[in-house]
RNA sequence: GCCGGGAUGGCGGAACGGUAGACGCAGCGGACUUAAAAUCCGCUGGGGGAGACCCCGUGCAGGUUCGAGUCCUGCUCCCGGCACCA
């Protein structure tokens, strides 16, 4: 192998960039800004892998090009460094998470610098730095002040193996996302953030952002807004009313029974003595089931009759009240009206327990299946007994509007909105997280004053939660000297909150800290915020589609409401890089032994080749397999580029000339400038690189290589292969980095070919191609086509019926045989 | 089950409704070399033909169009997400 000397060039230019602070964020007045953000990583012990790098290289290319096009570019990096792995490692080895984290961060930073990523390292942030989490705590206080952070006894997902609670989103198929341990539901006193108060805005403001359709849709579904009505069903014994939520109030006449969630508070009161035993048994069984078991058993509908009855407000029918675990306490009112004719689940339940099924929307056959079509179908059997009110004959939307208004007039119901989104469980029984700036005084949580921030994480060597599931004790709870304190406001004895914040906390606002990383007056300097926000391009993994991206939007909106930020949304354009698979086409994993290590790739081929290959593999957003031979391929390309400029003796190539290029070569250069520029803007890096290869293939055989071609070519290559480009640029005579050289411009007049190849079709099939001058008109093109013998053969003497002419592209001769 | 995305040579992938397979990998042939590596040149979707050329071809079945990988309808399979949310 005789490759160009990347092992010597790359470290040298990395040192140059560092020594000259080349990528310190410029804020030149009069220039447009561009905030180009990567999702910052959790610095794991295994180091950076090629999947992370795909996104980082993409944003680096965009950042480098934007700088050359005169933008003030902000391109920062940092560390989402609180998290469970370092803590679990500490439990095992006794090594403090701070030590492990510092080592891992150093390794990540080294790997990033080695890739030639052009971050402004002076803005690096670390969520575990007290100067950073001071402001995470400050934002929490704002949430607390506004009633958006509260303590509640809520059923939580308790993971005995991890000794902590988990958010719904951290559970996959009933097991913990981290470690795959079983999770059970149990009530516990917890900090909760009221994200539901922002549900409407989180949903509605999605229209302000340019995001991948799938992510956009996932957030919509996660928020899950449904509009319907709340209806009251009175019951006699004891006297009272049951409220239910339904999206189909038009089917109210079809209700044949009611169902409460087993945990519903009215179950006790409604159960008659003869049913009490069965009801209690069912409730006890439901309480014991984990979510996973409930899901697994979901196929079979189960439930028991309580003995109670409620009155249907539209027709005064007595409806039996059941309890069943297919009704969830956590959604709506925890109770439903069952309309088996028009709801799949109710239909199954009615079938299982032999309850009546009544058709109130015509169009299907309710004896065979629930008829749930909303679009078609007309209401039937939907008139009050006294005939005073009816929705018969109406379609669903009319019927819903009419009956909702009627219920409201009768005082029996009202329009209502419900969300799938739940409040965010915001506490973990862990050590390695942000402490809450809260003390407990007389059993009530009290905010510490802002001046006391940060509340520092106390030192310890006991990282493991202790106690039992009934009395869990977080690691901080074991530090009695730290826990016992005094409330600075009242002077009373106080106990510190011993939970810590979940990992998502720090990542909810890190993009703001980069704007003024050392600012002492608040999380962010307002002037900087107004200049740089919003983020123009945000690249990161699709696995954060609903977690990080929803939580960050929520915090951002709260910060917007308190006037700290000026934009309603933080991230304007979002792109997810695709997964990089192993060479075997499988997901990379240690157990399969197919993990590609970036360091060894750089050792073999250089950082520029790795950068280029990762972008050349395929579209940024696509999942694609790694192929080390492909890296060799792009290395050959870079070798050819090297030889365009550097001769065999290591000096500037003698083929370089100041002579004018041929018109054809100049045209190819301008076509390349256009394609590379447009492709980078559209994040189509693979086709941009392919065009650079085309130009190289054209230049390689030339004996005289005009500098007027080579110099812009080097600039076009520089965002992709910055070390090589800097080296060639300097050898071509430059005294300083090309990082701020003006990006080449193309001349539209020079892009066009003088001669075009016209496709000639007969009845839509290609029969010949003709080289004609650009702009040839239809008459001339037709004449040339008809003169071609290949064409005439296929005309076969038939009648010419029609000619389709697309200027400079094709002629299609339509003939009848 | 529902929602979103996808399917193009041996492989990764290109193609404003207008010459399918750019570019790269792998493979084959040639030049250079004592030889090999590296480099350079050429070929490389399938079938037929000595050749000029011809036929077939973008997951499957239809449709729209002068013309469909691209648009429409109905399927199959793969990937991601959600999953009793009333």
Image (cartoon, rainbow, N blue to C red):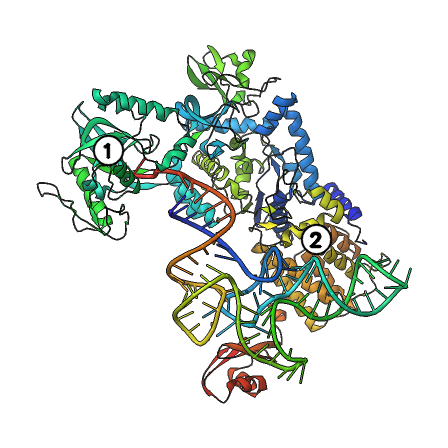
Provide residue A316's location: percent of width, then percent of height: 13, 35
**Disc 1 target residue:** A258
Examine the image and state in which quarter residue A258 appears.
Answer: top left
Looking at this view, name the residue that lies furthest to the left: A386
Examine the image and state in which quarter residue B40 appears.
Answer: bottom right
Q: Earlier in the sequence, mark 1 or mark 2?
A: 1
Q: Residue A26, can we see it? A: no
Chain bearing tag 1 is A
Provide residue A268's location: percent of width, then percent of height: 26, 21
Residue A10 or A764: which is nearer the viewer? A764
Q: Residue A424, can we see it? A: yes
Report whether A658 appears left or right of A33. Answer: right
Circle 1 SS class: strand
Residue A132 or A370: which is nearer the viewer? A370
Provide residue A249's location: percent of width, then percent of height: 23, 41
Q: Residue at x 17, y 48 (%)?
A: A380
Report whether A647 appears left or right of A211. Answer: right
Q: Is residue A313 above or below residue A571?
A: above
Residue A3 or A23: which is nearer the viewer? A3
Provide residue A355's location: percent of width, then percent of height: 22, 36
Crowd rating for badge 1 (residues with CA inside 10 Å; few <14, some 14–19, many 20+):
many
**Disc 2 target residue:** A629
Circle 2 SS class: helix
Examine the image and state in which quarter residue A754 appears.
Answer: bottom right
Q: Residue at x 55, y 43 (%)?
A: A541
Q: Residue at x 71, y 56 (%)?
A: A633
Report the quarter where the C terminus of chain A lies.
bottom left
Number of numbered callouts drawn: 2
Chain bearing tag 2 is A
Report whether A438 appears left or right of B52. Answer: left
């Amino acid at each position: 192998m005789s490759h160009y000397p990347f092992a010597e060039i790359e470290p040298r230019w990395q040192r140059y960039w560092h020594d000259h602070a080349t990528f310190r964020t410029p804020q030149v007045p009069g220039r447009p800004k561009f905030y180009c953000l990567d999702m910052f990583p959790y610095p794991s012990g295994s180091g950076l892998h090629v999947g992370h790098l795909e996104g980082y290289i993409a944003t680096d290319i965009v950042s480098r090009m934007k700088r050359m096009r005169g933008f003030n570019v902000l391109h920062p990096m940092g560390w989402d460094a609180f998290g469970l792995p370092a803590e679990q490692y500490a439990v095992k080895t006794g090594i403090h998470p701070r030590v492990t984290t510092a080592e891992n961060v150093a390794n990540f930073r080294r790997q990033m610098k080695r890739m030639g990523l052009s971050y402004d390292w002076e803005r690096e942030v670390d969520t575990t730095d007290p100067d950073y989490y001071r402001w995470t705590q400050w934002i929490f206080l704002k949430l607390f002040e506004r009633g958006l952070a509260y303590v509640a006894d809520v059923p939580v997902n308790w993971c005995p193996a991890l000794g902590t609670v988990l958010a719904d989103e951290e559970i996959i198929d009933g097991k913990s996302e981290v470690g795959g341990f079983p999770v059970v539901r149990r009530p516990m006193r917890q900090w909760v953030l009221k994200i539901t108060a922002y549900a409407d805005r989180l949903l509605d403001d999605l229209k302000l952002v340019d995001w991948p359709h799938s992510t956009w849709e996932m957030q919509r579904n996660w928020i899950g807004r449904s509009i319907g009505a709340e209806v009251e069903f009175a019951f006699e014994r004891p006297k009272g009313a049951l409220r239910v939520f339904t999206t189909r109030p038009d089917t109210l006449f079809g209700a044949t029974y009611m169902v409460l969630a087993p945990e519903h508070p009215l179950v006790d009161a409604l159960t008659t003595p003869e049913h009490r035993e069965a009801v209690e048994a069912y409730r006890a069984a439901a309480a014991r089931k984990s979510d996973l078991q409930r899901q697994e058993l979901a196929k079979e509908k189960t439930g028991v009759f309580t003995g109670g009855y409620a009155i249907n407000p539209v027709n005064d029918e007595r409806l039996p009240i059941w309890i069943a675990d297919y009704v969830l306490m956590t959604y709506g009112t925890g109770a439903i009206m069952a309309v088996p004719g028009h709801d799949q689940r109710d239909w199954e339940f009615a079938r299982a327990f032999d309850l009546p099924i009544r058709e109130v929307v015509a169009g299907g056959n309710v004896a065979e299946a629930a008829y749930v079509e909303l679009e078609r179908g007309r209401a039937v059997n939907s008139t009050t007994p006294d005939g005073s009110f009816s929705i018969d004959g109406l379609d669903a939307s009319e019927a819903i509007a009419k009956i909702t208004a009627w219920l409201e007039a009768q005082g029996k119901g009202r329009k209502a909105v419900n969300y799938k989104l739940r409040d965010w469980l915001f506490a973990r029984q862990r050590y390695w997280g942000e402490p809450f700036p809260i003390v407990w005084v007389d059993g009530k949580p009290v905010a510490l004053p802002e001046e006391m921030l940060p509340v520092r994480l106390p030192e310890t060597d006991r990282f493991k939660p202790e106690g039992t599931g009934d009395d869990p004790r977080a690691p901080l709870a074991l530090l009695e000297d730290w826990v016992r304190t005094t409330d600075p406001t009242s002077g009373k004895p106080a106990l510190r909150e011993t939970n810590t914040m979940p990992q998502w906390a720090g990542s909810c606002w890190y993009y703001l800290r980069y704007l003024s990383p050392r600012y002492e007056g608040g999380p962010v300097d307002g002037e900087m915020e107004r200049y740089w926000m919003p983020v123009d391009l945000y690249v990161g993994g699709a696995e954060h589609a609903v977690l990080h991206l929803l939580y960050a939007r929520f915090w951002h909106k709260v910060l917007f409401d308190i006037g700290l930020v000026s934009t309603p949304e933080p991230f304007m354009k979002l792109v997810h890089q695709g997964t990089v698979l192993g060479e075997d086409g499988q997901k990379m994993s240690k157990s399969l032994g197919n993990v590609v290590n970036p360091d060894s790739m750089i050792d073999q081929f250089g950082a520029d080749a790795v950068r280029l290959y990762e972008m050349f593999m395929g579209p940024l957003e696509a999942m694609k397999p790694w192929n080390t031979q492909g890296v060799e391929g792009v290395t050959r390309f870079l070798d050819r580029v090297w030889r365009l400029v550097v001769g065999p003796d290591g000096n500037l190539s003698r083929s370089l000339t100041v002579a004018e290029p041929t018109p054809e070569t100049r045209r190819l250069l301008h076509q390349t400038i256009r394609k590379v520029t447009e492709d980078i803007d559209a994040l189509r890096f693979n086709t941009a690189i392919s065009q650079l290869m085309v130009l190289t293939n054209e230049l390689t055989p030339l004996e005289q290589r005009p500098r007027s071609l080579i110099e812009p070519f080097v600039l076009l290559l520089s965002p992709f292969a910055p070390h090589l480009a800097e080296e060639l640029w300097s050898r071509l005579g430059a005294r300083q980095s090309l990082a701020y050289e003006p990006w080449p411009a193309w001349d539209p007049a020079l892009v066009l070919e003088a001669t075009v190849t016209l496709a000639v079709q007969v009845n839509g099939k290609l029969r010949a191609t003709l080289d004609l001058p650009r702009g040839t008109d239809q008459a001339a093109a037709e004449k040339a086509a008809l003169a071609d013998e290949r064409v005439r053969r296929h005309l076969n003497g038939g009648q010419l019926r029609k000619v389709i002419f697309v200027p400079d592209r094709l002629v299609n001769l339509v003939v009848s045989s």
